Structure formats: structure tokens, C-alpha cells
Amino acid sequence: MNRLRLRAEAGFTLIELLVVIAIIGILAAIALPQISSYRRRGYDADAKASVKNAYTAQEAYFADKYTYAAAISDLKAKGFRQSPNIGMADPAATATDFVITATVLAGCSSGFGVWTFTNTTGVLTGAPCG
């Protein structure tokens, strides 16, 4: 009789398995919204970094030519590398100032994820990815 009893206690019951699956489901329901929030913040950080890198390339261009670049291709010649998910508009540049804008191409709602830097104010402004 003891041999039969030992064999019957060797596994998990259906109730135990259902409780574990329910706990995993609750944890997943809590974690998924946080993951999408982290992704949106990552997109914003990528756009901000691209704008700051373009600013550095603009200053390097100005140091060589005494004017600011009016095309992203000119900045790429100075070492600027653009992220694949970021769209960079050609800078609105004059001889003394410029405005750089970066837009998140995928992962944000329309009109969000756009960041702009103006060198006259030195301020990075934008609409966070939504």
C-alpha cells in the first residue's frame, strides 16, 4: 500500500498548475503596459540623442566653414550618424543660427515624437512619443 501512495504523490495536481498559470497571467498583465511605456521613452531618447549629435556636427561644420550646414548630408560628412528609426529634416540654417528637427518614424502616434533644437536659445523642445 505504501508503494501506491508514493507513486500518486509524484506530480502536480491540476489545481496547482492552474494557480501557477493564473499568477503568471497576472504578472504579464502588469508588465505589458510598462514595456510599451519603456519603448516610447526609448524612442524619445533616440530622437533627442540624434538632435544633440546633429548639433555637435553643426558646430564642427561651423568651425571649418564659418557658416552652418543647410543639409543633413553636409553633417554626415562631419561624422553625424542617424538612427534608422529617426527622420531628420534638413536644418533651417543661416550663417549665424540653425534649427534641427528629428522625428520618430515608427512607434509613436502621429504628431508625437518630434524634437527640435534651436542654437539661439540652446533649448531642446518637443512632443514626447505618445
Image: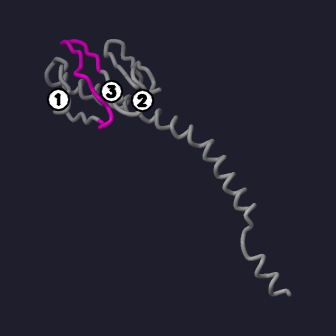
| Residue that appears at 44% across and 27% down | 129
In the image, residue 76 above or below residue 16: above
On the image, numbered disc 2 is attached to which residue? 108
* Residue 34: quadrant of the picture: top right
Q: Amino acid at mark 2?
A: Cys
Magenta span includes 48: no
Spatial distance from mark 1 to mark 2, Cα to Cα?
A: 26 Å
Spatial distance from mark 3 to mark 2, Cα to Cα?
A: 17 Å
Circles 3 and 2 in contact, beta carbons < 8 Å? no
Query: x%, y% of residue 48?
Result: 38, 28
Disc 3 on helix, strand or loop? helix
Residue placed most toward the observer, 114 or 24 = 24
Q: Badge 2: few (under 14), some or many (20 or more) residues near its Cα, within 10 Å?
A: some
* Residue 123: quadrant of the picture: top left
Query: x%, y% of residue 37?
Result: 52, 34
Relative to 71, is 108 on the left or the right? right
| Residue that appears at 20% across and 12% down | 94
Of labels 3 and 2, the one closer to you? 2
